[in-house]
């Protein structure tokens, strides 16, 4: 588990861009956090780092947007879905099999029907400063070993809640 803290939307996008550099075909990233936590902002930074030139917006009402880039990017939002079968019907697994990368907003909801290899990005608005985001990266499946390689990419945003208050 890697704990991060960003001070504004640009830093959140920079974290995402740093992580995007390590992505491989078929990678799955679950974005978890309340409304307004920065999931779409994260995706914007991620997509631009992959080479997406279009403006990235939330796919809340269309469920999924795909973008051409170094690796095809599939941005999914399952917030409005009420049944897991609807997630399956999106065909996300098939899109990943074609070599793309997927970011799934509200990914924790869809987790039971998604592949077991994923990077979870948990985002929360800081309790004191609503510009600050607390971000936790945690891998599942093959990501448990890949997670270690992410640490140097995001070092400048690393945060240790146990030692931070002692400085």
Image: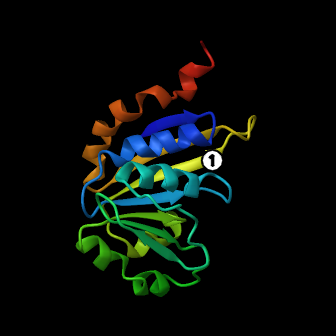
Please tell me which residue is depicted at 46% across the width and 87% down the height of the picture.
Answer: 85
The mark total stands at 1
Residue 158 seen anywhere in this rendered image of the structure: no
Quadrant in which residue 32 is drawn: bottom right
Disc 1 residue crowd, few under 14, some 14–19, many 20+, Cα 10 Å: many
Looking at the image, residue 28 lies above or below residue 84: above
In the rendered view, how is the structure colored? Answer: rainbow
Q: Nearer the viewer, residue 125 or 72?
A: 72
Quadrant in which residue 57 is drawn: bottom right
Q: Nearer the viewer, residue 77 or 66?
A: 66
Please tell me which residue is depicted at 68% across the width and 55% down the height of the picture.
Answer: 36
Looking at the image, residue 70 lies above or below residue 77: above
Please tell me which residue is depicted at 46% across the width and 80% down the height of the picture.
Answer: 87
Please tell me which residue is depicted at 70% across the width and 39% down the height of the picture.
Answer: 131
Quadrant where the C terminus lies? top right
- Where residue 93 sits in the image (x, y, percent)? 32, 76
**The residue positioned farthest toward the front in the image shown:** 53
Does residue 78 appear to the left or right of 92 in the view shown? right
Local SS, label 1: strand
Instruction: Look at mark 1 in the image and give the residue it sits on.
Output: 124
Quadrant where the N terminus lies? top left
- Where residue 114 sits in the image (x, y, percent)? 37, 72
- Where residue 112 sits in the image (x, y, percent)? 42, 72
Quadrant in which residue 148 is drawn: top left
Does residue 87 appear to the left or right of 142 in the view shown? right
**The residue positioned farthest toward the top in the image shown:** 167
């Amino acid at each position: 588990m890697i704990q991060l803290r960003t001070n504004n939307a640009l830093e959140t996008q920079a974290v995402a861009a740093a992580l995007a550099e390590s992505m491989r075909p078929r990678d799955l990233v679950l974005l978890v956090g309340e409304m307004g936590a920065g999931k779409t902002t994260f995706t914007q930074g991620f997509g631009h780092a992959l080479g997406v030139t279009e403006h990235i917006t939330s796919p809340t009402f269309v469920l999924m947007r795909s973008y051409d880039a170094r690796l095809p990017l599939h941005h999914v939002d399952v917030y409005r879905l009420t049944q897991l079968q609807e997630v399956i019907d999106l065909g996300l697994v098939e899109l990943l099999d074609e070599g793309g990368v997927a970011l799934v907003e509200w990914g924790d909801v869809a987790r039971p029907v998604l592949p077991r290899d994923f990077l979870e990005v948990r985002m929360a608005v800081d309790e004191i400063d609503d510009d600050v985001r607390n971000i936790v990266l945690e891998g599942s499946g093959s990501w448990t070993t890949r997670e270690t390689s992410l640490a140097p990419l995001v070092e400048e945003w690393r945060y240790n809640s146990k030692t931070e208050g002692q400085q």
